[in-house]
Amino acid sequence: MFGGLCYYAKGNPFSFLLGEDLALKLPAMQLISASASRAGDLFHPGGGEFVMREYLALSAGTLTDEDKVDEFVQASYGFVSGQGNPEEELAQRDLLEGRSGLYQKKKRPARQNEKP
């Protein structure tokens, strides 16, 4: 996927390995705190403008710390496979809705004079 590797938990993607990036799907609060602590940043596959906002691309410093990598991989796998605490995982709803539902633009209602 995206020219890299994708790993799944219970049929849902939880990790991407693309070039030098290891990106993991995380609960919203963990994603925010990891970004704030510079453990990683939002994943931009291929370095373009498209952002996979629910994935953290681990920083070079984090990737050199085996314990940190293991911690993030376990958290991601647990989150995607439904092993976490739903009250704390604000992005769990994102998983249930699916990726297409998250990025689908809402259609505006047609005005009276417009053709549908």
Image: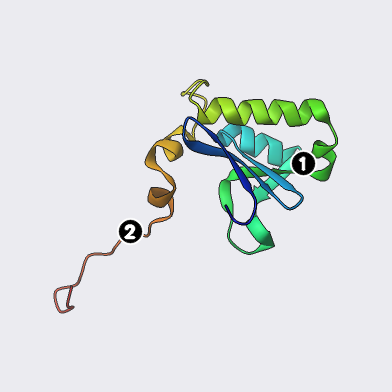
Q: Residues within 10 Å of mark 2 (few under 14, many from 20)?
A: few
Residue in the picture at 84% in, 31% down: 65
Q: Is residue 111 above or below residue 91?
A: below
Q: Is residue 50 above or below residue 75?
A: below
Relative to residue 6, is residue 59 drawn left or right? right
- Under tag 2, what secondary structure? loop
Q: Which mark is residue 38?
A: 1
User: Which residue is situated farthest in the left direction here?
Assistant: 112
Quadrant position of residue 34: top right
Residue in the picture at 65% in, 51% down: 4
Q: Circle 2 is placed at which residue position?
A: 106
Position of residue 73 measured from the top left corner of the image (x, y, whole percent):
67, 30
Report the amino acid beneath label 1: Arg
Quadrant position of residue 75: top right
Residue in the picture at 76% in, 37% down: 37
Q: Earlier in the sequence, mark 1 or mark 2?
A: 1
Residue in the picture at 46% in, 33% down: 92
